[in-house]
Image (spheres, helix red, strand yellow):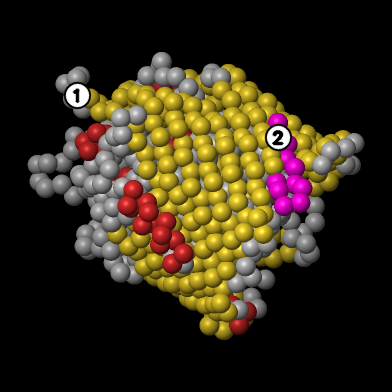
C-alpha cells in the first residue's frame, strides 16, 4: 500500500486534469458565511468552486459531471438517474449538502438515497473538505457541498430554453428559465425529463433504471429599508426504478423492488442588514419530502400517498432550520458570531405495509464563533462550535497559511468534529429502502468524534498552477454496518469502533496557449479500523486527465476530451465481502464533447459518454451492489435558445 501511495504522489506532476474557473467566487469561507470574497493569495484546495452554467441538462443526474473538477469528490450513480456525493472516500451522513443557504436533508445514509434536486438557478458548487464547517453543523466529517445560487443580473433579462435528448438511457428533457435584474422575482426555472432504461456495455438492458423528474424553482430578492431580503423555493417530484439483476428462472429474489416516488418542497428566506459596525444575517428554511417504495412498477397515476395501491415502505421527512450570524471587522481581523437551531422529524405513512423506522424527531441547537486575520504573507484563523440537543458535541478548527514566495504557498489545518448517530442508524429494523439488506439500528450508539489534520502546497504561475494536499483523520466510535447471522438469517447491524482515514489529493492546470487548457486531478483515501481491517464502503482511488480547446475563437466551436481512471478496490470489509460479489476491478472512462454557436441566440452541444463502451460499476453504486453494470456508450445532444 505504501508503494501505491508513493507511486500516486510521484505521478502527480504528470497528470493533467480538472478545469479551473478563473472567475469563481468563493462564498462559503470557513464559517460558512456568504462573504462574497475572492482571496487569490490563500490556498484554494480547501474551498473549490465548480461552475455549473456549462452543463446542458441540469437535472439531478447532471451532477455526475461535477466530479471531473474536484479530485476528492466522487458521485456514485444509482442506475444513472440519482447520484450520491462522496468526499475523501466517505459518503452518507458524513457529507453535508447545503442548498438554498442551509443544509439539505434527504436521508443521505441510504444506499439509494441521493441528491434529488435539479441544478436550476445554481451558479456554482463549492467543495470544502474535512470537518471545517461551523455554521452548517459539526457532523460534516468528510466535507461540505455548498450549492451557491444565481444572483440577479446586472442589467436586463434573459429567457432561455434548452432541449436535450440522447441514446441509451440519456434523459429526454426540456428546461426553461427567466433570469432578470432588479428587485422582486429575478429567476424562474422549470425542468421536465424522462430517462428510459439503459443497456450496459455487454448490450444487456438493465431493468429498473428508468426515471421521471419534474421540478420548479423560483428566486427572489428585494430591499426594504436597510434590509436585503431573499426568498428561494424549489418543488420536485421524481419517480424512478432501481437496477434489477437478471436472475435465471427459479432464482428470483423474494422481494422485487418497484418504483420509488419522491415529492419534496424546499423553502428558504434570507435577510441581511447593517447594525452599526456589525452585519446581521439570518437564514431560515423548511424542507418536507415524501418517499415511498412500491412492491412493483406501477403507473404514474397510482403513485400518490394514500392510494389504494399502497406502498411497501413510505415515510415523511420534515426539517426546519434557522441560522443567525453577526460579523464585523475587529482589530486587524474579521469576527463572525452565530447561532443555529435545527429540528428533524420522521413520520411513517399509515398506509405503508412495513415500517423501517419509528416515528421520531431530533432537535439540535448550537452557537459558533470564527476569527480570521490576514497580515502580509500569512493568514491565520480559528473557530469553535458548541452543540446541544439529542447529542452534544463540538467542532473546532485552526488554520495557518503562508505565502513562501510569489508562486508558492503552504497551508496547515487542524480541525475536530463530532457526529451524533442519525435516526436511521439508531432505530432501523427491516429491509432497507432500495438497499436489499435487513438493517438493525442501535439506540445506544454514542457520538462519533474525529480529529483531522491536513497539509497543502499551492504553486501558481501565469500559465501553470498546481495544488497538493495530504490528510489524516482519526475517528473515535466510528459508526458502520457489520453483518451477523446469529438470528438465523443475515442481518446488518450498526456498530461502533475506532478508525482512521488518510490519503492525498492533487490538481494541476497548464495553459500553454490562449485557446488550449490541459488539466489533471488525482485522489486516494484509505480507511481502516483499529486492527487495520478495511472500513466498509470506501470509494476507490481515482485520477484523470482533461483537455479543452477552442477550435474557433470566443468558444464559437469548443472541444473537450476527458479520461477518468478508477483504481481497483480490493480492500473489502466483512460487510462488503457478504454484500458484494468480490472486489471492484479498475476501469477507465473516456468521454468527449463538442459545443458550438449557431447565432447570438442559439447554441448546440454533443457529448459522447463512456466512449470506449467500458463494462463498469462504481464500487459504491447500488448497481454494483445488485450485481449489474452501469450504462455503456451514451450519446447526448442539446439545443439552447436564449433571447
Q: Position of residue 542 (x, y in %)?
A: 39, 55
* Residue drawn at the location 48% of the way across and 43% of the way down: 471
Rendered image quadrant of residue 532: top left
Does 14 sit left or right of 299 as displayed?
A: right
As helix, strand or loop, the secondary structure at mark 2 comes to strand
User: Pointer 2: residues within 10 angstroms few (<14), some, or many (20+)?
Assistant: many
Q: Position of residue 126 (x, y in %)?
A: 59, 50
Q: Is residue 370 magenta?
A: yes
**Residue located beneath label 2 in the image:** 370
**Front one among 250 and 10:** 10
**Front one among 543 and 530:** 530
Residue 628 visible at all: yes
- Please state the extent of the stretch shown in magenta in the rendering: 369-379
Q: Position of residue 509 (x, y in %)?
A: 54, 66
- Quadrant where the image shows the C terminus: bottom right
Residue lying at the far top in this picture: please name it: 444
**Front one among 616 and 496:** 496
As helix, strand or loop, the secondary structure at mark 1 comes to loop
**Residue 485 numbered mark, or none:** 1
* Residue drawn at the location 70% of the way across and 46% of the way down: 379
Q: Is residue 570 magenta?
A: no
Q: Look at the picture and state if 482 lies above or below 142.
A: above
Amino acid at each position: 500500500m505504501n508503494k501505491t501511495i508513493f507511486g500516486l504522489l510521484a505521478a502527480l506532476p504528470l497528470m493533467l486534469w480538472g478545469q479551473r474557473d478563473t472567475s469563481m467566487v468563493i462564498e462559503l469561507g470557513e464559517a460558512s458565511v456568504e462573504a462574497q470574497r475572492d482571496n487569490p493569495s490563500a490556498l484554494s484546495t480547501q474551498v473549490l468552486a465548480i461552475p455549473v452554467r456549462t452543463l446542458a441538462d441540469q437535472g439531478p443526474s447532471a451532477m455526475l459531471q461535477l466530479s471531473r473538477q474536484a479530485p476528492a469528490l466522487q458521485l456514485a450513480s444509482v442506475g444513472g438517474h440519482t447520484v450520491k456525493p462522496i468526499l475523501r472516500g466517505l459518503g452518507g451522513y458524513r457529507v453535508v449538502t447545503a442548498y438554498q443557504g442551509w443544509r439539505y436533508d434527504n436521508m443521505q445514509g441510504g444506499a439509494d438515497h441521493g441528491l434529488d434536486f435539479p441544478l436550476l438557478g445554481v451558479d456554482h458548487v463549492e467543495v470544502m473538505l474535512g470537518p471545517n464547517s461551523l455554521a452548517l453543523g459539526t457532523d460534516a466529517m468528510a466535507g461540505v457541498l455548498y450549492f451557491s445560487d444565481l444572483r440577479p443580473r446586472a442589467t436586463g433579462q434573459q429567457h432561455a430554453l434548452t432541449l436535450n435528448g440522447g441514446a441509451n438511457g440519456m434523459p429526454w428533457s426540456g428546461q426553461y428559465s427567466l433570469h432578470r435584474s432588479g428587485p422582486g422575482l429575478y429567476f424562474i426555472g422549470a425542468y421536465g425529463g424522462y430517462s428510459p432504461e439503459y443497456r450496459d456495455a455487454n448490450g444487456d438492458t438493465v431493468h429498473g433504471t428508468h426515471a421521471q423528474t419534474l421540478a420548479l424553482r423560483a428566486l427572489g430578492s428585494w430591499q426594504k429599508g436597510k434590509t436585503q431580503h431573499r426568498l428561494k423555493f424549489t418543488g420536485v417530484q421524481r419517480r424512478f426504478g432501481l437496477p434489477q439483476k437478471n436472475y435465471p428462472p427459479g432464482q428470483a429474489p423474494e422481494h422485487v423492488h418497484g418504483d420509488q416516488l419522491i415529492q419534496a418542497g424546499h423553502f428558504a428566506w434570507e435577510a441581511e442588514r447593517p447594525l452599526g459596525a456589525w452585519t446581521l444575517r439570518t437564514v431560515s428554511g423548511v424542507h418536507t419530502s415524501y418517499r415511498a417504495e412500491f412492491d412493483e412498477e406501477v403507473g404514474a397515476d397510482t403513485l400518490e400517498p394514500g392510494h389504494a395501491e399502497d406502498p411497501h415502505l413510505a415515510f415523511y421527512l420534515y426539517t426546519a432550520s434557522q441560522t443567525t450570524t453577526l460579523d464585523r471587522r475587529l482589530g486587524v481581523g474579521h469576527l463572525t458570531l452565530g447561532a443555529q437551531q435545527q429540528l428533524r422529524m420522521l413520520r411513517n405513512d399509515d398506509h405503508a405495509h412495513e415500517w423501517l423506522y419509528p416515528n421520531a424527531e431530533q432537535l439540535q441547537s448550537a452557537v459558533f464563533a470564527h476569527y480570521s486575520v490576514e497580515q502580509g504573507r500569512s493568514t491565520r484563523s480559528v473557530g469553535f462550535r458548541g452543540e446541544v440537543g439529542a447529542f452534544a458535541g463540538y467542532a473546532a478548527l485552526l488554520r495557518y497559511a503562508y505565502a513562501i514566495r510569489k508562486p508558492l504557498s503552504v497551508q496547515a489545518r487542524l480541525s475536530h468534529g463530532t457526529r451524533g448517530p442519525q435516526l436511521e442508524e439508531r432505530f432501523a429494523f427491516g429491509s432497507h429502502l432500495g438497499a436489499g439488506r435487513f438493517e438493525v439500528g442501535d439506540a445506544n450508539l454514542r457520538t462519533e468524534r474525529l480529529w483531522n489534520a491536513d497539509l497543502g502546497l499551492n504553486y501558481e504561475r501565469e500559465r501553470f498552477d498546481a495544488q497538493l494536499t495530504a490528510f489524516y483523520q482519526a475517528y473515535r466510535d466510528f459508526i458502520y454496518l457489520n453483518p451477523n447471522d446469529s438470528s438465523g438469517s443475515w442481518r446488518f447491524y450498526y456498530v461502533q469502533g475506532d478508525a482512521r482515514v488518510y490519503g492525498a489529493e492533487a490538481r494541476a492546470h497548464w495553459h500553454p496557449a490562449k485557446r488550449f487548457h490541459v488539466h489533471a486531478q488525482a485522489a486516494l483515501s484509505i480507511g481502516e479500523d483499529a486492527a487495520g481491517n478495511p472500513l466498509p464502503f470506501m470509494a476507490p482511488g481515482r485520477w484523470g486527465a482533461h483537455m479543452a480547446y477552442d477550435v474557433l475563437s470566443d468558444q464559437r466551436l469548443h472541444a473537450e476530451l476527458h479520461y477518468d481512471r478508477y483504481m481497483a478496490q480490493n480492500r473489502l470489509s466483512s460487510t462488503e465481502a457478504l454484500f458484494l460479489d468480490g472486489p471492484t476491478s479498475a476501469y477507465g472512462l473516456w468521454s468527449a464533447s463538442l459545443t458550438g454557436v449557431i447565432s447570438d441566440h442559439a447554441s448546440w452541444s454533443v457529448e459522447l459518454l463512456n466512449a470506449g463502451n467500458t463494462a463498469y460499476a462504481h464500487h459504491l453504486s447500488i448497481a454494483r451492489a445488485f450485481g449489474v453494470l452501469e450504462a455503456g456508450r451514451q450519446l447526448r445532444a442539446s439545443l439552447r435558445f436564449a433571447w
